[in-house]
Image (spheres, rainbow, N blue to C red):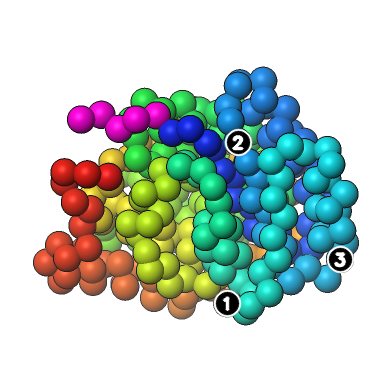
């Protein structure tokens, strides 16, 4: 039986020292989602910011309907902030969105519509026909393509942009992928790889990306290599050795 269309789109946004980026990002998403008639909420998680991020979020609450600011008061980390947001979202569908305006609100609309058509996950790729990047640092781009090539080979999948955080899921997929282990940027590969390995349906579409205009990137490639590898091997072991113990039930979401 086809899945019913979701009723509320939760945009989960981790934020650390993003006082300058959050206002234009949230306003852009609000305008585009409202124009498209999409019921939505913003779940923004302040992950131990040292600037005015929390104060800015409080000020934006009066302006942005459906904005829920949260503080991650436990151990910090990109993945931990996302998990905290996922734990508190109210929607039956969600997208993970970067606070720095690198992702396109128009692509989020396309994600929502594909979820409404019955897909359980929508994965964007910046590196297929129709996708594009603006001002992508060359060294990061080279490392990105090599890492994604390794993931494609390891899991035998068509998705060639697994490392990009900007993806959409129905809420039951998030629950079906728990427990989520990755505390840092490696959550960006844990979620989609688990969804694929556990048998949830997905589609891939081209998306656009542009480099941040404010602040500095939080990803530190030297620190993350072993963490990405750990999560890859963890999910790979599940795929080939768990004997299907974690696959989604075939008769229900």
Marks 1 and 3, Cα distance to the nearest angstrom?
23 Å
Q: Disc 3 to disc 2, how far (Cα)?
A: 27 Å
- Look at mark 1 in the image and give the residue it sits on: 223
Question: Which comes sooner in the sequence, label 1 or label 3?
Answer: 3
At 78% from the left edge and 68% from the top edge, which residue is drawn?
49
Predominant secondary structure in magenta? loop
User: For this view, does 215 lie left or right of residue 199?
Assistant: right
**Looking at the image, is mark 2 or mark 1 earlier in the sequence?**
2
Q: Determine which residue is flagged by label 2.
A: 40
Q: Secondary structure at mark 2?
A: strand
Query: How would you rate the neighbour count of disc 1 (Cα within 10 Å): few for under 14, some for 14-19, many for 20 or more?
Result: few
Q: Is residue 240 visible?
A: no
Name the image quarter holding residue 4: top left
Number of the label disc, if any, that sits on residue 234: none
* Residue drawn at the location 49% of the way across and 66% of the way down: 186
Q: Residue at x 52, y 36 (%)?
A: 8
The span from disc 2 to disc 1 (Cα, nearest Å) is 35 Å
């Amino acid at each position: 039986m086809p899945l019913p269309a979701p009723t509320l789109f939760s945009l989960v946004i981790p934020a650390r020292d993003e006082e300058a980026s959050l206002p234009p990002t949230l306003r852009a998403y609000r305008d585009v989602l409202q124009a498209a008639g999409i019921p939505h909420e913003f779940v923004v998680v302040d992950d131990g910011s040292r600037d005015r991020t929390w104060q800015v979020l409080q000020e934006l609450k009066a302006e942005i309907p459906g904005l829920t600011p949260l503080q991650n008061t436990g151990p910090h980390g990109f993945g931990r902030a996302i998990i905290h947001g996922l734990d508190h979202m109210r929607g039956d569908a969600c997208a993970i969105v970067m606070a720095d305006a690198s992702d396109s609100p128009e692509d989020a609309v396309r994600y929502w519509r594909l979820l409404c058509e019955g897909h359980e996950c929508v994965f964007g790729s910046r590196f297929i026909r129709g996708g594009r990047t603006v001002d992508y640092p060359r060294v990061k781009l080279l490392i990105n393509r090599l890492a994604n090539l390794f993931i494609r080979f390891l899991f035998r999948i068509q998705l060639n942009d697994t490392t990009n955080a900007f993806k959409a899921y129905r809420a039951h997929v998030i629950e079906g992928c728990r427990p989520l282990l990755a505390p840092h940027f490696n959550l960006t590969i844990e979620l989609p790889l688990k969804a694929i390995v556990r048998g949830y349906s997905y589609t891939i579409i081209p998306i656009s990306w542009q480099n941040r205009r404010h602040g500095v990137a939080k990803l530190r490639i030297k620190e993350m290599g072993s963490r990405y590898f750990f999560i890859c091997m963890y999910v790979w072991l599940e795929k080939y050795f768990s004997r299907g113990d974690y696959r989604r039930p075939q008769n229900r979401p």
